[in-house]
Amino acid sequence: MNVKTRFPPSPTGFLHVGSLRTALYNYLFAKKHGGTFIVRVEDTDRERLVEGAVESLIRTLKTVGISYDEGPILVGDKLSEKGGNGPYTQSQRLPIYKEHAQKLVEQGSAYYCFCSKERLEELRNQQQIAKLQTKYDRHCLKLDAQEISRRLAAGESHVIRLQIPDGETTFQDEIRGSITISNSEIDDQVLMKADGFPTYHLAVVVDDHLMGVTHIIRGEEWISSVPKHVILYKAFRFPMPSFAHLPLILNPDKSKLSKRQGDVAVEDYLEKGYLPEALVNFVALLGFNPTGDREIYTIDELIEAFDLTKVNKSGAVFDRTKLDWMNGQYIRSIDSKRLFELAQPCFGDASTLPDEQKKKILGVEKERLVTLKELEERAKMYLALPEYPATDLVWKKADAQDATLHLTNLLKLVESTEPAVFDRRELIEEAIKKYIGDNGYQNGNVLWPLRVALSGQTQSSGPFDLLWVLGAHEGIQRITIAIDKLTS
RNA sequence: GGCCCCAUCGUCUAUCGGUUAGGACACCAGGUUUUCAUCCUGGUAAGGGGGGUUCGACUCCCCCUGGGGUCACCA
């Protein structure tokens, strides 16, 4: 069978990390089986629409490395689409839904309902007070054909409801196995809303079928509405797709991951300096692990390893600490060109520095970065020497006199060294270590004051790195300042 | 509350009847080191409870408990 999966976001805001994982799993599954992956915009709720959400979604999927074969695309700033099963935006498919809903009414699987929202609300209230199941009472099912056509002709506001048959519905979930739900649990679901738009349930079934979707992989919160979809598939005589419901991603308190308890938008994490690669890797392992003894996977390795039957059943807490660790791993191991590209917006004040120097800063500082955003703070000292007290220059096992001696000698050493040496980190190190070795000094006596003189900080990267990034000229200046501090 | 889903270290997980229950994050202790960080070594830490099935259950079945999801003209 030719596998086809889909990711159907509704353009109501930013991409949720849970949605990122859903999109990712759909993508991985399709690629693993040589199938196709499509993106479809589910914008049937006109009230929750957010302008620009589709564009932002397309961009985010791209930066995160999830590509699709069919769906909406951006040509320049213009929205367009690719694929032969479009349109891929539900608001552009209204006639299709109307026709399908109509067909259901004709064959007696669905019916018109003229009940007002007020009546529905009143009904619900009464049922709640009586502690009954809140369910539509099928008031309009009793209407005769004549009355229906009269009210329709009069232009009365109405919806179309699916008539849920008696009995129960059983379906196979690829992750959870067989699930049975009694049809009595299900309300006569609205299929077409009064505004002429379909509800999710109608649109998703019609589109998935028309677009040839074979595997529906989505969040666990959808399990309880699968019977509605199964009933629709049967009513339309559409072949049944496979269902797989993913475990939820959880807040630390185990509730469904939500705003309020932290960031949930992929854009937030990207903005904070998490690498797309790390985020994808991390989120992929929330609910799925091919072996149990490996943590780092590229997206292609994930495709290779992906197996729907190995996806967990229970929810997974989104553990920010582990994401931090993984992000650090990526920062340290990723290709330096790619890292520089990603870090470009994170230099802050130091962004005015030449690229060559910024690359050096990144190379030196990446050892202690958790997120790229932290670079902004760390890079400042390369731009300007921070204020610091003279006492910081003194190593714990030495005194000010000793520090002054070494800094004075080092100053001479730097001044008399070929400028070309400062282009090579290892040559700088060699020269200073020679000074230490030849005189039988201890590393700390020499390196501590040098490092503090260069960084203005008691905690920083090493003196060789600093001298390399700063260059001879700036190095001389900073050492001179240090000597002044000690001797004044 | 009805219905549905779920249940291994604090967290993410491995185990598909027989293991000293493994790995990772975090944490703690060492080591490397001029500081911080990185890195390396080691350690603490888990099968919710009760019944079965079986020679033998973390693993299979049932009940309880606990957690979660869902009950819209939202997706």
Image: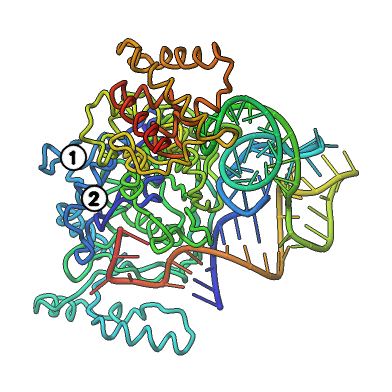
Q: Position of residue A154 (x, y in %)?
A: 9, 79
Q: Residue B72 at what x, y percent from top left?
A: 33, 71
Q: Residues within 10 Å of mark 1 (few under 14, many from 20)?
A: some
Mark 2 lies on residue: A41
In this rendering, the answer to whether A264 lies above or below A388 is: below
Q: Quadrant of residue A68?
A: top left
Residue furthest to the front in view is A488
In what element is the residue under mark 2?
Answer: loop
Q: Position of residue A132 (x, y in %)?
A: 47, 83
Of the pair A142 and B10, the residue shown nearer to us? B10
Q: Residue at (56%, 31%) from the top-left corner?
A: A294
**Three-letter amino acid code of the residue under disc 1:** Ile
- In which quadrant of the rendered image does the C terminus of chain A lie? top left
List the residue tagged with mark 1: A73
Dot 2 amino acid type: Val
Decide which of tag 2 and tag 1 comes sooner along the chain: 2
